[in-house]
Image (cartoon, helix red, strand yellow):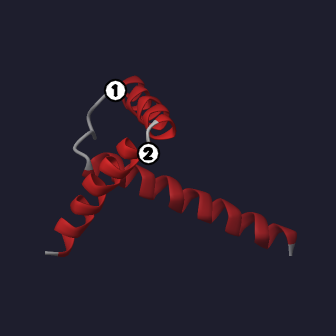
């Protein structure tokens, strides 16, 4: 049973990483250097922790990008 739960945890972790990679590609950043991507993410995390207005602004941009897929 323990091996089954470990396998499921690894499967879920892999799925999450694939989804996160898809977000990088969707944002048009597929060919950027990893250091730049990490810098963008760290900067963004700092911004949304410090400024709720920035969080809302970025959320709206992301929601629009996802809704554009539905069209």
Dot 1 crowding, Cα within 10 Å, few <14, some 14–19, many 20+:
few
The mark total stands at: 2
Disc 2 designates what residue? 52
State the image coordinates of residue 68 (x, y, percent, origin top left): 17, 66
* In contact (CB < 8 Å): disc 1 and disc 2: no
Viewer-proximal residue among 45 and 14:
45
Tell me the quarter of the picture where residue 6 sits. Answer: bottom right
Q: Is mark 2 on a helix, strand or loop?
A: helix
Q: Locate the C terminus by quadrant.
A: bottom left
- Left or right: 29, with 21 as reference point: left
Q: Indicate whether 70 appears above or below 25.
A: below
Q: Percent position (x, y) of residue 7?
A: 71, 66
- Residue 42, given in percent of the width and then of the height, sits at 47, 31
| SS class, disc 1 | loop
Q: Which of 68 and 36 is in front in this view?
A: 68
In the image, taking residue 4 as reference, residue 2 lies left or right, namely right
Looking at this rendering, what residue extends furthest in the right direction? 2
Tell me which residue sits at (26%, 39%) in the image: 29
Percent across and percent down for residue 30 are 28, 41
Numbered label attached to residue 33: 1
């Amino acid at each position: 049973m323990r091996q089954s739960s470990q396998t499921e945890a690894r499967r879920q972790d892999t799925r999450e990483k694939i989804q996160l990679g898809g977000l990088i590609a969707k944002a048009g950043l597929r060919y950027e250097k990893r250091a730049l991507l990490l810098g963008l993410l760290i900067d963004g995390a700092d911004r949304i922790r410090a400024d709720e207005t920035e969080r809302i602004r970025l959320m709206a941009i992301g929601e629009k990008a996802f809704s554009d897929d539905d069209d």
